[in-house]
Image (tube, rainbow, N blue to C red):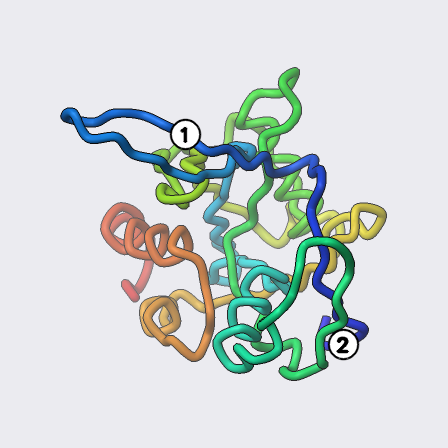
């Protein structure tokens, strides 16, 4: 995960995941133009291991995050880049600047499956736990990337035990996934959520706060 080399910036003529558009419209009599991307909706799952009293999250390299940091730190390396071909980039930053902590998640790209079925598949593939569909609890849905994509993410909650673990997880290597499973102890979760030295998604922070309000008061034994 930490070895990134042979960087090159190139055009994106077609993608299975993103479709760029430009919308022209009038709002209150004013003509406007807005560029946006259409992308898949997604599911995310807050996983809590009740055997260990910890959250199960994932950690992975995100090229978009890495490139944002690259351009912020080395804007000169992006000057003059064209969309006509591949442009090599210097190996200017460690791969760690593009690694983020996230909830287990996946895109909604199988119309024959329910959101719950997709979520359970992602839990098994990424984190290695076998969770029945009826053990999922829907928390809410929200729009992510409203200025660029506007896609919807549906958030679920799942409780697991050590006995439900059937593999080490890690994603699907044949699809290019390289995922590390990380356990966050409940008693460290709030400080972790707001510690900016650990790059993370909005959904992770939201779900940890939801857990404190809705689950912690009902937990047996000592309250965290």
In the image, residue 38 sits, relative to residue 162, either above or below, namely above
Quadrant, the N terminus: bottom right
- The Cα–Cα distance between marks 2 and 1, rounded to whole angstroms, is 39 Å
- Mark linked to residue 3: 2
In front here: 138 or 22? 22
Residue sitting at x 40%, y 65%: 186
Count the marks.
2
- Name the image quarter holding the C terminus: bottom left
Secondary structure type for disc 2: loop
Residue drawn 45% across the image and 38% down it: 36
Mark 2 or 1: in front is: 1
Q: Is residue 190 left or right of residue 137?
A: left
Residue at point 71%, 80% (across, down): 90
Residue extending farthest left: 28
**Mark 1 lies on residue:** 23
Camera sees residue 73: yes
Q: Quadrant of residue 77?
A: bottom right
Which is more N-terminal, label 1 or label 2?
Answer: 2
- Residue 18's quadrant in the figure? top right
Q: Residues within 10 Å of mark 1 (few under 14, many from 20)?
A: few
Query: Foreground: 191 or 9?
Result: 9
The answer to whether residue 156 shows anywhere in this view is: no
Query: Residue 53: x, y in percent?
Result: 45, 61
Q: Residue extending furthest top?
A: 112
Q: Position of residue 199 (x, y in %)?
A: 46, 70
Q: Residues within 10 Å of mark 2 (few under 14, many from 20)?
A: few
Query: Residue 222: where, in percent of width, then height?
Result: 30, 64
**CB under 8 Å between callouts 2 and 1?**
no
Task: Indicate the secondary structure of the residue bearing disc 1.
Answer: strand
Mark seen at residue 191: none
In the picture shown, does residue 223 fall above or below 6? above
In the depicted structure, whether residue 157 falls above or below residue 95: above
């Amino acid at each position: 995960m930490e070895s990134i080399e042979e960087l090159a910036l190139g055009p994106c003529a077609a993608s299975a995941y993103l479709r760029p558009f430009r919308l022209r419209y009038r709002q209150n009599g004013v003509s406007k133009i807005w560029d946006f991307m259409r992308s898949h909706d997604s599911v995310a799952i807050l996983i809590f291991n009740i055997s260990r009293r910890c959250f199960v999250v994932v950690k992975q390299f995100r090229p978009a995050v890495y490139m944002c940091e690259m351009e912020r730190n080395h804007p000169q390396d992006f000057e003059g880049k064209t969309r006509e071909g591949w442009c090599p980039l210097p190996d200017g930053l460690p791969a760690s600047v593009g690694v983020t902590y996230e909830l287990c998640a996946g895109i909604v790209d199988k119309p024959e499956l329910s959101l719950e079925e997709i979520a359970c598949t992602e839990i098994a593939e990424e984190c290695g736990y076998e969770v029945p569909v009826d053990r999922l609890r829907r928390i809410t849905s929200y729009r992510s990337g409203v200025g660029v994509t506007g896609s919807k993410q549906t958030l679920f909650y799942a409780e697991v035990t050590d006995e439900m673990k059937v593999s080490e997880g890690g994603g699907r290597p044949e699809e290019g996934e390289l995922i590390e499973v990380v356990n966050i102890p409940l008693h460290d979760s709030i400080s972790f959520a707001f510690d900016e030295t650990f790059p993370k998604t909005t959904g992770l922070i939201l779900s940890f706060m939801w857990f404190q309000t809705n689950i912690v008061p009902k937990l047996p034994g000592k309250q965290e």
